[in-house]
Image: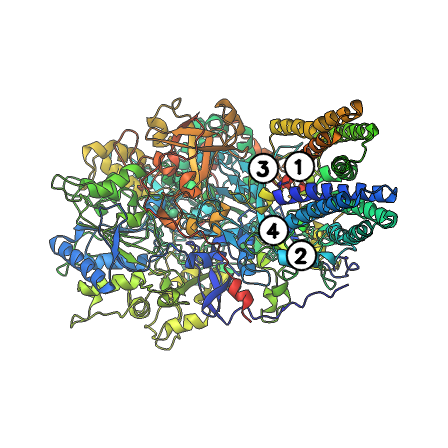
Amino acid sequence: MTMLPPPSAKKLGLVIDLDTCVGCHACAVACKEWNAGGIAGPLTDENPYGAEPAGVWFNRVHSYTLDALDEQPEMTLHFPRSCLHCETPACVSVCPTGASYKRVEDGIVLVDEDKCIGCKLCSWACPYGAREYSEVEGVMKKCTLCVDRIYNEHIPEESRQPACVQACPTRARHFGDLGDENSAVSKLVAERSGVALMPELGYAPVNRYLPPRARRAAPPPAATVAEDKLDTQQLPSLLRWLDRSLSR
Amino acid sequence: MTVEPALDLQKPVGDEVKQTTCYMCACRCGINVHLKNGAIRYIEGNPNHPVNRGVLCAKGSAGIMQHYSPARLNKPLLRVGERGRNEFKEIEWDEALALAAQWLSETRAKNPDRLAFFTGRDQSQALTGWWAQQYGTINYAAHGGFCSVNMAAGGLYTLGGSFWEFGEPDWEHSKYLMLWGVAEDHDSNPIKLGLGKLKARGAKIVAVNPVRSGYGAIADEWIGIRPGTDGLFAFALIHELLKADRIDLDYLVRYTNAHWLVIRNPGGADDGLFARDAEGRGLCWNRHPHPNPLPPAGEGAEPTTAPAGVDGAEPFTSPTGGRGRAEGAGEGGLAPASATGVSPAVVGEYALPDGRKVVPVFHLVAERYFDPQYAPDAVAERCGIPAETIRRIARELADVAFEQVIELPIAWTDTHGRRHESMRGRPVAMHAMRGISAHSNGFHTCRALHLLQLLLGAVDTPGSFRYQPPFPRPIPPFNRPGKTRGADGKLDSPPLGFIHGPEDLLVDAQGQPRRLDHAYSWKYPLAVHGMLHTVIRNAWAGDPQPVDVLFLFMANMSWNSAMNTTETIRWLTDKDEQGAYRIPKIIYSDAYSSEMVAYADLVLPDTTYLERFDAISLLDRPISDADGASDAIRHPVLHAADQSEGRDVRGFQSVLLDLGARLKLPALVNEDGTAKFRDYADYIVRHERAPGVGLLAGWRGEHGEHEGKGAPNPQQLQRYIEHGGFWHIAIPESARYYKMANRDYLEWSAKLGFIAKPDAVVLQLYSETLQKFRLAAQGHGPVQPPDGERERVATYFDPLPIWYEPFEGTQVAVDAFPLSAISQRPPFMYHAWGSQNAWLRQITARNYLYLHPDTAKRHGVADFDWVHVDSHHGRITVQAKTAGNVQPDTVWTWNAIGKRKGAWKLARNAPESQQGFLLNHLISDITPRGDYANADPVTGQAAWFDLRVRISKAEAAEVCAPQFESLTASDPSNAPLRYGAKFRAAP
Amino acid sequence: MHPAFSVIFFTTMSGAGYGLWFWLGIGGMLGSPLPRLPALVVLALGFIFTSLGLLSSTLHLGQPLRAWRAFSQWRTSWLSREGVASMVCLLPALGFAVVIWRGQDARLFGVMLWAFSLATVACTAMIYVSLKPIPAWRHALVLPGYLLFALLGGGLAYAAARAWAGMAIDNDVGVVAMAGCFGLWRMKRRYWQDIDHGALPATRASALGLPANRTVRVFEHPHTEANYLTKEMGFVLARKHSRKLRLIAVVMFAGVPGLCASLVWLLPHLNAAPWLVIAAVSALLGAFVERWLFFAEAKHVVTLYY
Ligand SMILES: Nc1nc2c(c(=O)[nH]1)N[C@H]1C(S)=C(S)[C@@H](COP(=O)(O)OP(=O)(O)OC[C@H]3O[C@@H](n4cnc5c(=O)[nH]c(N)nc54)[C@H](O)[C@@H]3O)O[C@H]1N2
Ligand SMILES: Nc1nc2c(c(=O)[nH]1)N[C@H]1C(S)=C(S)[C@@H](COP(=O)(O)OP(=O)(O)OC[C@H]3O[C@@H](n4cnc5c(=O)[nH]c(N)nc54)[C@H](O)[C@@H]3O)O[C@H]1N2
Ligand code: SF4
Ligand code: SF4
Ligand code: SF4
Ligand code: SF4
Ligand code: SF4
Ligand SMILES: [Mo]
């Protein structure tokens, strides 16, 4: 099953707005929480209360600084990273057991933990670091795109979204069908020039990131401000307000 | 090809959902707790909840690990070893309560003030303050004094509302938001939701903050200000706006005291007070004839204009016989400042009938901030902001406020009965938090920001800062602190209240502090939240009086909420010559094995937030938003006793009521001496603060038919539970802006019981309250400060905002301590609690001192090097890391990551105690000079961020310094945590 | 990449084992197989080497009992192909044993044995070569390197076995071995030079979806302590250690065996056996160090995020 299915029309994925992400880790923890008890659980934690605590996380939030460039000032950038549900993912094709697979129906890339032998090869094959191996469980784990939420009829329709999307306090995360150019997410990507990560590697990620918008450190067009009011060079006297007729 | 495995995608999330309120921080979001076989399967945001609208932060999602934390306390504990050794025996509740009641009743019999009852988190203040009043101690407060009282007091004494979580930017309409010193705030999720909205709309966000992380990262512009200089920056903006005449004078005369006349009588007892008429109404100077009066009151409005054309105005005459005359001004006369139909003068000097000279408030404002010392060029260097940037920001503010006015087609009626067809707004919003307030100049800086907002006409208009009900309230709020006890031992009012003048202070005949924390004394007159940060030193020193029992709730006072931790630990354990502890008894309620538990004699284990009833009350710290009022409850979604073998904990509020009944406190027992309230749930429902007013405003009245006010409803909690755990009432559309002068709003507010009368709230550019203190310091009035305090009071009780160098900066040599050191809240940790959380601690199990690369280079420091950080008070040795997103003269770290070894049931080699550190070891609780608390001279707010340090490279090390003795001799199990495995296995 | 002992042990041992079989097969094909006993011993030795390798590689698995599943995805997965090849290779090995035992013609099985052995080693190499995120493994010399290591190590051992069996060792063997050592050294040298200068196939800016000219620095890691990714892919080897280890590796896989081979070449009357054993063992140890470096020096694209 590690043969990739023919490209599906439906390409479910995430759109993450780097212009709005404040790096709060809410998505990461909500993901951990949902998936711990979901189809890919547990997301085992080793040394939970000791030195070197380390657990399985499907979503990790990085923080960077960007140097100034041309008109753009220095910036701080927060960057959540999870599986991109690639269209041609080597993580699937390298898998010797068929445990890794891409769903025919919607393109979600999953691990069938019952088949996984824990060879870790898929994690080597993923350039995005989206696969997390659990030593304790002996199997590979990864973002499920919350497949057990998004189709779950026990969940109210408006909440049938990945846990990370549901939780994100700035609503910087969006979920939808990127295969449908009329979907809200596709429109958002088009409008904000969403990008794929490292497309040069040929994995054809489905998820898109909306890059941070240009920062406006520069003065606004002065035209909107009446020039005479801006002459602050001379210190005017208080008297100019003496004849101001104000009404209460 | 094999087939895809069959996935069960239709598995119910859990077997039941309970809706309650999150408590992983003070934001109080609504949560849906999904339970499966009695265990927590999933906690999600409640989409209908007005606070979080379905979103949930990292802490909220990690509530599972908080609830199941191994560090939970399970049983009352009685100290067996020496205090601080963390050696206890488990006892039964009966014994614990009997013992506590005995200590408390002996103390009460001696002198109720010998009980110091201080609570950390103040979400039960409505209960704890009331309880302290019944007990009769003046020595009560919550943690606000070290948290953000500058913000609260600055706001309440200026706007009758405040930033903090009492107000919010108009997220829907604002076009320009300035965030001053905000990292997480108490309004965490609402702010994040709001920022998301502003971003989506493309509004400009400006972050004024020495560090560019979190919200600063997404801000369109980052102003890397030097700590403690925001007041100067604000003044420079004001200076520019004044010079450019970009001031909303109409707004000022309608809603503020800009036109009120201030008496200019240097040396006189009335100097700086408002000129008032016989009825005590403030006066203004009415220029007349009125060139273009406002339209008369709208249809149906009550005629408020007096026949003379001036509401209630007496035709005053000036001493020269005719109408008053100002230099260069036209004819005019005195009128009540609150009159309508007047055209008040905002500048000029005028004379009262008795000859005294008066000037309008705005005149004083303009005079002061026109001064070249506040010109951008004059402040740029100190603030670390280029003058050109300051000028540009001023231009941008003016541009948005005056050229991008928004008008909502919503008619409203002001308190004079005049109807306005639309709501005009100046879409400039501001929000500020502890970056402003945690400095010794924070009160005035906070007022400076409000002044800036007011000059722009940007308070509670569309697009600007908005009040959240029950605010605005009268300025200052009416309730004054309790001072005297009645025959039943009860205090005349709750111990915390608002000071209106020197006569309200809690000082003795010599003018010395009466309270243990010195709040409401001449040293810190407006310490309206008390001063938790001085309590332990003063209890140890018996200053002003010894206490017998120190009763603490939810405050980790031997660690991350203490300044001067090392000494604090010593004071807690110090003994007198007889070998008795100087602080005789310490009772402490915590839910977890915090550092403070080790210092208690008796530990009362609280439940977790999922096991108890709580009221998130409008009488306390409300969770309303600008469009509606809300309150909420917590209710037990899990039963403590079922959570683990032998777990026997009780909600602190119920315990407090139980203790009160055992002590037979006045309002806690029936006539026959039996307990009046079964437990806290019963109290929430049946207690009435005033007739018809209780902790919860929803479903009042016998059948739940009333809102706001109404008789107790026995089914009230049930109604809350059925409605998702919260109550929300929308403000009528016509009442959503201009709340300080909006008739519909004020009537709505009064109807719900938030304010006593629907009177307009006049916003205070100029604070007469402050001037009263200054006059007292200058030798006027019956209550005056001791001589030693006169100069200080006279200096810091300036009725207009001032800026001064934070105390630590002036009292240590700047060259010796050239850097500022500050901390920030990590968004995924709540103070100390997060580190016991198996998920959250993985995000940050250790902290680093962040330095600007240039600063690091100057000191020869590279990433991960160890550095000594020295303040005038102490030294820590920690690991450093460089990052360019900080103002170069500032170093910073995440707050409260450092843990004491052996606390929180973490392994003794956990990074939190080995490499994680606190700045608190460097922060002195008193000023370098040693004369006052390290605090704001007006409010007593702890000045955490005044800290100045120097750094030097240290030898490589494994463990940071200082280290303290381990609180335990054992480590927790190292077994992997497989949370959720059983849910997957379950059908 | 984290140099996992089990994987390194696996590739070196199985390389040597298949190398042995390769030469055994060549010998069979050329009609000059080893005599019965030595042939069976060498066959068994190869079997032990490859099995130890395979066994150790299953130790690396999280679920060794499910290892059988790894044979199923040979259509896409080189790991699966390697598993299949290694099993398939047992057939000619068995056949070879039978014909040798019976003293029959070993040519057919000889051809099959060397071909399948080579194919298995090639599959092993391809597991690594196929991984785009690890450019050091995509290098054109990785496949030849794996093959040559197998041939050299296996060849030296095979020659030693021949000598042990008392068969004449032509001093051409010395020349071939020296050439092999020299070639391998040049190959590795070239490889190391290239990977030292080679860049990752993407930049941090591209990893974050930013314009190429944006300079990005790490402010904070997602978690302060190490995680699977940083431990598995974020292994960093100090440059000075890598220099030292490269030297050790070259001395062991090329220097010492080359020296031994020169003795065999120059001194025809010398008992070649012990020298060839020394050469073989040294080559094996050298291969081990080289394989450790192969992992430790390979940078994974995901490190761009850290
Ligand atoms: N350097 C530095 N120090 C600071 C600050 C800073 O910015 N920098 N900030 C200051 C400020 S603003 C604050 S508010 C303080 C906060 O300081 P604290 O309020 O002392 O800190 P918390 O970690 O919230 O600890 C409160 C205690 O409440 C306990 N607790 C948690 N849940 C429950 C419960 O349900 N019931 C009971 N009974 N107890 C519970 C915790 O276990 C903990 O021991 O820190 C102050 N200290
Ligand atoms: N996640 C999380 N949320 C919390 C808490 C928590 O512990 N964790 N604690 C709650 C509590 S008790 C409180 S009091 C609030 C506090 O909420 P905040 O005030 O938002 O929190 P702080 O981290 O104290 O943030 C102070 C900010 O001011 C900046 N700063 C420091 N000095 C200056 C200065 O002089 N000028 C300016 N302009 N900025 C300055 C700091 O860099 C920092 O960003 O947060 C509450 N919310
Ligand atoms: S991101 Fe990685 S794990 Fe996810 S589909 Fe792409 S290659 Fe596979
Ligand atoms: S670790 Fe599991 S999923 Fe990944 S390649 Fe190996 S068998 Fe497949
Ligand atoms: S989609 Fe689901 S599994 Fe994937 S990162 Fe988001 S929450 Fe985690
Ligand atoms: S929850 Fe949203 S804002 Fe927070 S880190 Fe994740 S994407 Fe960013
Ligand atoms: S902000 Fe987070 S921790 Fe605080 S109440 Fe809301 S969800 Fe809970
Ligand atoms: Mo606070």
Quadrant where the image shows the N terminus of chain B = bottom right
Q: Using the image, determine if residue B712 lies above or below residue B505.
A: below
Marks 4 and 3, Cα distance to the nearest angstrom? 21 Å
Circle 4 or circle 2, nearest the eye: 2
Rendering coords of residue B910 (x, y %): 42, 44
- The chain that hosts pointer 1 is C
Residue labelled with disc 2? C67
Q: Using the image, determine if residue B519 lies above or below residue B471.
A: above
Marks 4 and 2, Cα distance to the nearest angstrom? 20 Å
Q: Amino acid at mark 2?
A: Ala
Circle 2 or circle 3, nearest the eye: 2
The crowding category of the residue bearing disc 1, from other C-alpha atoms within 10 Å (few below 14, some 14 to 19, many at least 20), is many
Residue labelled with disc 4? A132
Q: How is the image coloured?
A: rainbow
The crowding category of the residue bearing disc 3, from other C-alpha atoms within 10 Å (few below 14, some 14 to 19, many at least 20), is some
One can see residue B111 in this view: yes
SS assignment at label 2: helix
Residue labelled with disc 3? C218
Residue labelled with disc 1? C288
Dots 1, 3 in contact, CB < 8 A: no
- The chain that hosts pointer 3 is C
User: Residue at 30% of width from left, 44% of height from top?
Assistant: B558
